[in-house]
Amino acid sequence: QSVLTQPPSVSGAPGQSVTISCTGSSSNFGTGYGAYWYRQFPGQAPELLIYGDYNRAPGVPDRFSGSKFGTSASLVITGLQAEDEADYYCQSFDSGLRGVIFGGGTKLIV
Amino acid sequence: QITLRETGPPLVKPTQTLILTCNFSGFSFDTSRVGVAWIRQPPGKALEWVALIFGDDDRRYSPSLNNRATITKDSSKNQVVLVLTNVDPVDTATYYCAHRGTWPNVGGLGFDSWGQGTPVSVS
């Protein structure tokens, strides 16, 4: 059971937009700890997409955007492309656990 | 450019001790904000944080490991080592080491560079 809750899967047609939600609590997002998003292709290491809630990592296209409000964060991907099909993870820090927390991951199907 | 590379045994027996090494380049543990974490991923499952060490030697561990993990750093060798005792088949996973990003005016803690991972099977 992950501390951060993500939908197991989302899907969208090429060109459409999708939103991946990440629900936390008062001891992580609610305290102000940042939301981070990673993409992972099969058999590869995760790569950073978004840091500090909404900042894109170098080289990440502006089709990817992040936001956070209260105890939830979201990743929006616009203009879906076939190559966006991957697993996406949210991550933060939890003051109660005094450690790093991950969501359970969301498989994006294009 | 930051690079990290994990090495370790691909197979260990239950109750044995697992030792993993992360060799890195492109940064040094020169401030308390610098950190390296171990993160693992069981086959077909989600990412799971294991341990984290900072430049001031502050160390954090996942409570789920029940005090079986120890993380250390050797700044002279540019290495971070994870020791996991009394391993069990549930510890079977790909283990990644990752560099904590140090962006200015950014809250929280995230990882901007990852190694390629090393698979470990406990059987």
Image (cartoon, coloured by chain):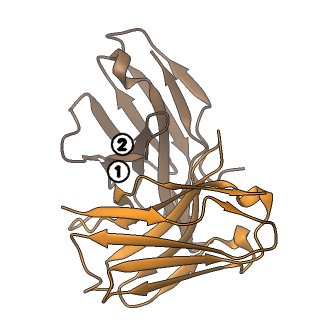
- Rounded to the nearest angstrom, the CA distance separating label 1 from label 2 is 5 Å
Crowd band around label 2 with a 10 angstrom C-alpha radius: few (<14), some (14–19), many (20+): some
Q: Please name the color used to draw chain A.
A: brown
Q: Amino acid at mark 2?
A: Ser
Q: Are marks 1 and 2 in contact (CB under 8 Å)?
A: yes
Q: Is residue A107 above or below residue B119?
A: above
B43 or A6: which is nearer to us? B43
Q: Position of residue A110 (x, y in %)?
A: 44, 15
A24 or B5: which is nearer to us? B5
Image quadrant in which you'd find residue B51? bottom right
Image quadrant in which you'd find residue B11? bottom right
Identify which residue is drawn at 65% across, 49% down: B42
Left or right: where does residue A54 sit relative to residue B20?
left
SS of the residue at dot 2? strand
Left or right: where does residue B102 sit relative to residue A1?
left
SS of the residue at dot 1? loop
Identify which residue is drawn at 70% across, 76% down: B17
- For disc 1, the marked residue is A53
Q: Earlier in the sequence, mark 1 or mark 2?
A: 1
Identify which residue is drawn at 42% across, 8% down: A13
Does residue B108 appear in the picture of this structure?
A: no
Identify which residue is drawn at 37% across, 60% down: B111
Q: Is residue B40 above or below residue B54?
A: above
The number of numbered discs placed on residues in the rendered structure image is 2
- For disc 2, the marked residue is A67
Crowd band around label 1 with a 10 angstrom C-alpha radius: few (<14), some (14–19), many (20+): many
